[in-house]
Amino acid sequence: MKNFLLVLFVFATVQLFGQTINPDSYKSLYKSRLKSDINLYYNPLMDKYDICFVKLDIEVSDQSTSVSGNVTIQAKVVKTLDTLVFDFSNYMTVDSIFINNKKVIGNHSENTIEFIFDSPLVINEDFTAQIYYNGIPDPDGRGVSTAYNSVWDKNVTWTLSESFHAYEWWPCKQVLSDKIDSAYIFLTCDDDCKAGSNGLLTSEVDLANNKKRFEWKTFYPINYYLISYAVSEYQDYSIYANPEGSNPVLIQNYIYDGNDCLYYYKSDIDETINFIELFSDKFGLYPFANEKYGHCLTELGGGMEHQTMTTIGNFGYYLVAHELGHMWFGDYVTCATWQDIWINEGFASYTEYVALENLQSVEHASGWMEHAHSKAFEEPNRSIYIPFEEAFYESRIFNHSLSYKKGAAIIHMIRHEINNDNLFFASLRNYLSEYGDSVATGDDFKNSVESSTGINFDPFFDQWYYGKGHPRFDVEYTQLNDTLFMTVNQSTSSTETPVFQLFVDFKVCFSAGDTNLRLYQSGNIETFIIPLSKTVTNIIVDPDNWILNEEGMVDSVGPPGNNKSLFSFFPNPANETINIRFNVKLYSQEKQIQILDLSGRLIKTITSNSNLIPVNISDLSNGVYFVKGISRKNTYTYKFIKQ
C-alpha cells in the first residue's frame, strides 16, 4: 500500500506543480486544422437568428471519440432569414435534417450546414431545426479526446470546445454574443459508466443492450463552447457548500471508481467548499446556485471551466480555484470577443490570488503575484488586448504571460488605484450584476468600474490594457533640514507606452521605524518635496508589490542647490489662497501650475511668466491635494491641505 501511495504521490505532484505554472496549458496548443479563415469563424448569416434552446441527445463512449445522435435547436429570427447556417465539421456525417418537423435537404460542406428557405422567415418568427448525425471527430482537432489512465485503470472520454472546437462534435452556432437560454444534454453510454455534463442530473434511464441515459438540464444561459460531456467508469462524490445567506450549493464530483482514487483526491476536492463560500462572499453568490458546481476527472492536462461542471485533470489548489473562479468570470459573464479574453482568464487567474490571500496567507499570495510578474515580464512588447488579426490563433488568445498573469496583475493594480477594498470588491459585484448571463468587453468592465468608483480609468486602460510593457522606477533622494527631495525617473520597457501614470507607494525608512507615502506619478521625471523631520536611511519603491514594475535603483545624492528646487509655496494648510514662488533662475520663463486631487484628476491649470503666482483654492472642498509646478525642464509636485 505504501508503494502504491508513493506512485500516486509522484504522479499527482508532477501534475500539481505543472498546474501552478499554467492551469490551462492545453488551451494554447496550436492545431493544424483550426478554422483559420476569418469567414469560417464568423458568418454574418448567423446574426439573423438567436438561439433560445438546444437539446443534445447523443450516444457516447469512454473508449472512443465517436458521437452519434441528434441536436435540436430552437431559435428566433432577428433579421429576415432566407438562409440558415450552422457550424459543423466535415469529418462528421449528417444523416438527416428537419426544419419545423419537416424533413428537408441541406448542404453540408466547408464545415457548415446550410439550408435555404422557400420563403424567408420574418423578424420574431420562431423555428426549430433538428439534425441527426454521427461520426468520429477530427483526430487532429480538440473537440473530443479519449485516453486510458494506467494508475486508476480507467478509460475516459471528454470534450473541449474552447475556443473554436464545438463544431467538431455537434452542429452549433459558434458566436460568443449569442448565449443559449437553456439546454438539455442527454448522454447515452454503457451502463457501467456515468456521463457528466452541465446543469442538474434530472434522470438516469436504464435502456436496452446494457445502456443508460443521463439526462442533464440547465436553465441558465450558456455559451456554445461551455456545453460539454465526460464519460468514464465514475463514482459520484457529492458534497455541499454553504454560502452565507444562501441555500446549500451542491458540488457533484465524478471521480474514477475504485483503486482508492477518491481517497487520494478527497481532501483536495473538499477544498472546493471553502472556495465557493469565499468567492460567494467576495463576488456575489455562486451564479448557478440553483443547479450545481462539480468536476469530471479526466486525463486533461489542466482544467476547462465547463459551466457548472469543470473538466479537470487533477485537483491542485490553484487549478480548482481558477476553474471555479471562471464560473463568475467567463461563464456567468463571458468575453464578448476573443480579443477580450482577459475578461475570462485574467479574472479567473486573480481568483487564485484571492483564494491564497484569504484562505492561506498574505505571504502565499505575495509569492503568487511575484511569479505572475515574472511571467508578465516575458512579454514586454505585446498588449493584453488582442489585435483583431491575432484573435484567431489560440496560442495568442491563451498566452499565459499576457491573458493570465499580466491580466491578473492589472486587476491587482486596479485594486491599488481604487485604494479601498470594500469599494473594489463592490465594483466587481456591480460589474457581474450588470453583465451577468451575458457578454462583456474590457471597456465594458472599465466603464462599470468607473461608475462604481467615480475614478477615470481611461489612462490606466490605455497604458495597461491596450498599451504594452511595464515601468521601471529609479529614485534619487536627499534631505535638506526637514525636507525630503525625491526625484523619481520612470522608464518603460516599450516605446509604445512611454509613461505609466499611476499611484506608487514608497516606504521611507528611518533608523527607527518607517513611513509609507502614496504619490501620483504623471510624467517620466517627477520630483516630490515632502516635509520630514526624521533622517531617511532608505527608500523602497512599491514595497507591497502592487505594481507590475521592474526593480530600479535607489540612490541618496547630495543636498539640492537652487537649481534643484523648482518652486516653493505657502501657506500649508491653506484656506483661500496658496502662493507659488518659483526659482529666481526661471524669471520670465513660462511656467504652469496644476492642481490635482488625490486620484490624479486635474482640477485647474494656471500658466504664467511671473515668479510669484497666487492660486485661488476657495472653491475646493476640504481635503488633500497636489500642487504641481512645470517648467521647460522640470516637474515638481507637493501635497497640500485645503481646510
Image: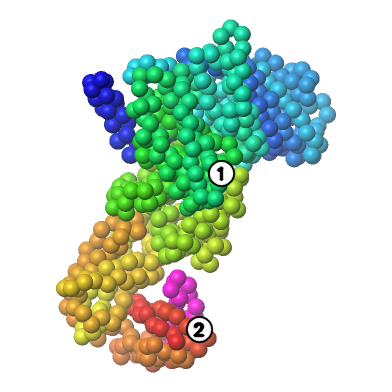
What span is in magenta?
592-608
Q: Residues within 10 Å of mark 1 (few under 14, many from 20)?
A: few
Residue at 72% over, 33% down: 75
Q: Are marks 1 and 2 in contact (CB under 8 Å)?
A: no
Quarter of the rendering containing residue 125: top right
The residue type indicated by label 1 comes to Asn
Q: Position of residue 279 (x, y in %)?
A: 47, 48
Q: Earlier in the sequence, mark 1 or mark 2?
A: 1
Q: Position of residue 297 (x, y in %)?
A: 43, 27
Q: Which residue is mark 2?
A: 620
Residue drawn at 61 percent across, 45 percent down: 438
At 49% from the left and 80% from the top, the residue drawn is 604
Main secondary structure along the magenta-highlighted residues: strand
- One can see residue 566 in this view: yes
The amino acid type, in three-letter code, at marker 2 is: Leu
> x and y percent of residue 66 in the render?
53, 15
Instruction: Give the quarter of the figure containing the N terminus.
Output: top left
Can you tell which mark lies on residue 4? none
Which quarter of the rendered picture does the C terminus lie within?
bottom left
Residue 523, picture quadrant: bottom left
Disc 1 marks which residue? 247
* Placement of 57 over or under 460, stated as above or below: above
| Residue 78 inside the magenta-drawn segment | no
